[in-house]
Amino acid sequence: MTTPAAPRAHEQQPQPGLPHGLLGYYESPIPIRRATLGDAISSEWTKIRSVRSTLWTLGVMIVLMVAIGLMSALLIAAADTDMAGEPVVALGFFGVLLGSICVITLGVLTIGSEYSTGMIRTTLTACPSRARVLTAKAIVFFLLAFTITTVTATVVAVFQTAILGAGVDSGSVWLRATVGVGLYIAALGLVSLAIGAIIRHSAGAITVMIAVVLLPLVLALFMFSDSLRGLQRFLFEYSIPNQLGALYGSTVTETGPSGWEPLLLMLGVAAVALGGAYLALDRRDV
């Protein structure tokens, strides 16, 4: 009597419960589709809202903007100081300038922390398109920084106007001091994100960005030689604190960028920096 041969390992056998003659091929109920930029944005949003660095940096920025802005208004009100035609909302400048360091830090950490922990390998394995990863990070970070900065600047401006009771500033001044400042700080954060992608070291990138913000103004203060007057004026006019002050309608120089020009300059710098980050991310190994 011949014994039936055992089925070979590579031969598929019908699965129990399936119709007769139908091989047991498994079809996932989850639809299979190509990953999109929306998927990458959703992933980056989950990352940025679930890490403590976002809560701490943006939380400190809000505290600085509110505390310094209200304190400035209260001190001026107590001293009965004449604003001499200066816009009331300009008192928010000091809080925003310090708060910008928090946005710079978060911008660097948005990508720099993944390099320091090695998680960038997991990110690029899940989404091999490096351009899509950087674009998603830039979009999520920009919208978050813009929203938080604009809302906080608006709240501070409202309270300053109420405390001083010095009348209402013009609509263009309010727009630049709220939406304009929000866009400027968010664009500055994009520069930080790009520098973080290029340098790939969080501490180093943060140091570079703080130098970019403060060093030109500090150098200009110590240029006493007449031969350096032109360079000194240029550093004063195009330093980030002076450009930020121009959005508030209050600058340390009579010339240089004014109105919306500082925002256009910063958006241009952010575009160039992101271009360099795309090239660096695409041409170098992780």
Image (tube, grey):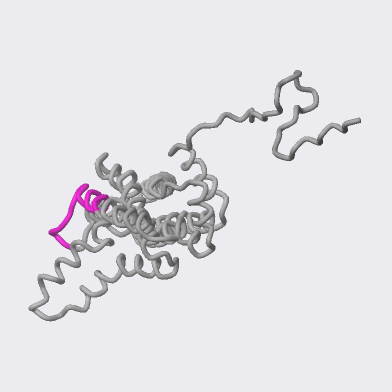
Q: Is residue 271 above or below residue 21?
A: below
Q: Is residue 255 above or below residue 167?
A: below
Whether residue 6 is in magenta: the answer is: no
Could you tell whether 168 is left or right of 10 in the image? left
Extreme-front residue of the structure = 1
Q: Where does residue 103 sit, x and y in percent of width and height?
A: 41, 57
Extreme-top residue of the structure = 19
Whether residue 254 is in magenta: the answer is: yes
Name the image quarter holding residue 77.
bottom left
Residue at x 55% of width, y 31% of height: 32
Which residues lie in the magenta part? 253-268
Q: Where does residue 280 sit, x and y in percent of width and height?
A: 34, 59
Residue at x 18% of width, y 52% of height: 258
Which one is nearer the viewer's eye here, 18 or 102?
A: 18
Residue at x 48% of width, y 37% of height: 35
Could you tell whether 6 is left or right of 121 in the image? right
Count of marks, rendered view: 0
The answer to whether residue 92 shows anywhere in this view is: no
